[in-house]
């Protein structure tokens, strides 16, 4: 339960940024390098978590990765 709660908290860390970017229709202040590093980190963690069958780590990184993909989409769309 602690791991899943931690996964939930990790997962929601990017949600305010996704919402703000969507609301303002602007992503110019966001670093493309940061977004790409987050995505690479998530892919790496997901690879590790699937090998270990760690549902908490899979959950957290799936959600954060999904938010990072949305932010990347906004970065491209709202140049």
Image: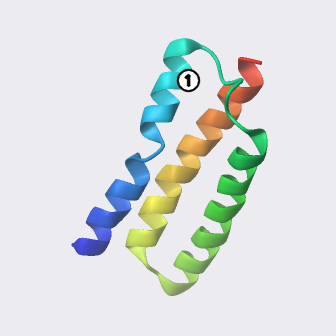
User: How far across and down, in percent of the image, does residue 41 sit?
Assistant: 66, 64
Q: Is residue 33 left or right of residue 23?
A: right
Displayed quadrant of residue 37: bottom right
Q: Which residue is mark 1?
A: 21
Q: Is residue 43 left or right of residue 21?
A: right
Q: Is residue 42 left or right of residue 19?
A: right
Residue placed farthest to the front in the image?
A: 29
Q: Is residue 42 above or below residue 75?
A: below
Task: Depth check: give the residue in front, 24 or 56.
Answer: 24
Secondary structure type for disc 1: helix
> Which image quarter: residue 57?
bottom left
Q: Is residue 68 above or below residue 46?
A: above
Q: Position of residue 8 (x, y in %)?
A: 33, 56
Residue drawn at x 51%, y 56% as measured from the top left:
62
Question: Is the residue marked by circle 1 packed among few (<14), some (14-19), or many (20+) residues within 10 Å?
Answer: many
The outermost residue toward the top is: 24
Foreground residue among 53 and 17: 17
Q: Note whether 69 is above or below 42 in the view shown.
A: above
**Residue appearing at x 51%, y 51% in the figure:** 64
Query: The N terminus lies in which quarter of the figure?
Result: bottom left
């Amino acid at each position: 339960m602690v791991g899943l709660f931690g996964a939930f908290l990790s997962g929601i860390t990017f949600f305010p940024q996704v919402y703000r970017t969507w609301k303002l229709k602007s992503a110019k202040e966001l670093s493309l390098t940061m977004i790409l590093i987050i995505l690479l980190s998530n892919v790496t963690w997901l690879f590790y978590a699937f090998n270990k069958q760690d549902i908490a780590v899979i959950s957290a990184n799936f959600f954060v990765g999904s938010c990072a993909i949305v932010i990347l989409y906004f970065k491209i769309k709202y140049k």
